[in-house]
Amino acid sequence: MITLIGGVAAAAVAVALLAGAAGMVLGAVRRWWPWLAVLFGFNARYRVASRDELRGINAIDVALLVLAGAAYAGFWPGPGTSHVPWMALAVAQPLLGILVLVATRLAGRSGLMGGGLVLSILMLVDGKAPVVAWVGVAVSVLLLVGDFGTTARPSRILALALALGYALLVVWFACLAALLL
């Protein structure tokens, strides 16, 4: 049952991210842009996105964190049964990110990438879907660099990392859904 829930959650993340990107391109209201799209918009100077839009709690960000935690939990007890503590860390990171987001109104969203990095490394260690695992590692690194690297000055290099990472994140969650379903 947890595998099915995880698969549906992973598919929902992929769809929500696609919808967020489409909304950004079409000029939809910014409150429906996931934080990664806001970071991209700021760094690319696209539609004059502001870093200040990251302050506060956005419902789409919270939903993505909950769904990512559920998707990671779909692999419970982990690729290989000796990885229960590491799987607990992977599942907990996006969920704890919500608490950090509520407390700070700014930080915590990167728990999605931290949990994804842990899950991807576990997949690599156990040889489960190595291509998907490597995509997960690449996604996590690109998006963490983009997230932590964004400062007061926009950077086209970070915009490129965020755009590539965002696109790969959609693919990665679609692949996780396929593995679980």
Image (spheres, rainbow, N blue to C red):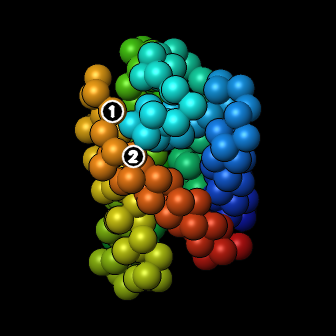
Q: Residue at x 42, y 71 (%)?
A: 135
The percent coordinates of residue 160 (x first, y second) are 39, 53
Q: Is residue 54 visible?
A: yes
Q: Kindly state the secondary structure of the residue where label 1 is placed.
A: loop
| Label 2 environment density (alpha carbons within 10 Å; few <14, some 14–19, many ≥20) | many
Of label 2 and label 1, which has the lower sequence position?
A: 1
Q: Are marks 2 and 1 in contact (CB under 8 Å)?
A: yes
Q: Please, is residue 9 above or below residue 151 in the view?
A: below
Quadrant housing the C terminus: bottom right
Which residue occupies the foreground of this view, 60 or 176? 60
- Closest to the observer: 149 or 76? 149
Residue 118 x %, y %: 34, 59
Quadrant of the snapshot with the N terminus: bottom right
Which residue: 45% across, 16% down?
Answer: 52
How many numbered discs, if any?
2
**Residue type at the position of mark 2:** Ala
Disc number placed over residue 159 in the picture, else none: 2
Whether residue 181 sits left or right of residue 106 in the image: it is right
Residue ID at (69%, 60%): 11
Residue 22's x, y, as percent? Answer: 70, 47
Q: Is residue 13 left or right of residue 65?
A: right
Residue on which the image places disc 1? 154
Residue type at mark 1? Pro
Q: Vertically, is 78 above or below 94?
A: below
Give how far apart the Cα atoms at labels 2 and 1 are.
8 Å
